[in-house]
Amino acid sequence: MIGKLNHIAIAVPDLESSIKTYKSMLGASVSEIIEQKEHGVTVALINLPNTKIELITPLGQDSPIQGFLRKNPNGGLHHICYEVENINESKKFLLKAGGRLVGDGEPKLGAHGKPVLFLHPKDFNGTLIELEEK
Ligand code: CO
């Protein structure tokens, strides 16, 4: 069912500082800083030849990653996003196999304007998984 790795998201407490580290220590090519108000995060993309890494930091009071950073004050791996052909078919496939979804389980428009679902980390060794329709 899952296809390409679309991105890996890393929650960071200080975006400027993380960007600096990726540039200076890894020679990374990093995008401009993008505010995604409707998703409650500020993002910088590290573009790699085969995928991208999203450095995400909270934007606003009710950011969905606030709780994560409270538990992990130095930041950490937040989620992994796999591409799927059809989000509703993927949801059916997962639920039939006993998988669980996060939230109300309805696909929402994600940060890239495409429908996404989040799968429960308890089913995947503690890793939050995002599925994004291609
Ligand atoms: Co994501």
Image (cartoon, rainbow, N blue to C red):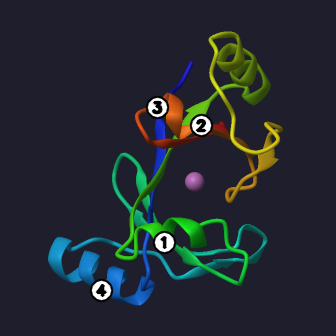
The answer for how far apart the CA atoms under marks 2 and 3 are is 7 Å
Q: Position of residue 133 (x, y in %)?
A: 69, 36
Q: Determine the image quadrant of residue 129.
A: top right
| Ligand 1 position by quadrant | bottom right
Residue 35 position, x and y percent, is 65, 80
Quadrant containing the N terminus in the rendered view: top right
Q: Which residue is mark 2?
A: 120
In space, the residues marked 4 and 3 are separated at their CA atoms by 31 Å
Contact (Cβ within 8 Å) of mark 2 with mark 3: yes
Instruction: Report the residue at 75% width, 77% height from top.
Output: 37
Residue 95 against residue 12 in the figure, above or below: above
Residue 72 vertical position relative to residue 115 in the rendered view, above or below: below
Pick the residue in front: 30 or 99: 99
Q: Mark 4 or mark 3, which has the lower sequence index? A: 4
Q: Determine which of the numbered discs, if any, sits on residue 20 in the image.
A: 4
Q: CA distance from mark 2 to mark 1?
A: 18 Å
Report if the beta carbon of the residue with label 1 is closer than 8 angstroms to ligand 1. Answer: no
Residue labelled 4 has its Cβ within 8 Å of some atom of ligand 1: no
Give how far across and how far down residue 131 sits, in percent.
62, 37
Tag 3 residue: 124
Tell me the number on the disc at residue 69: 1
Q: Name the amino acid type tagged 4.
A: Lys
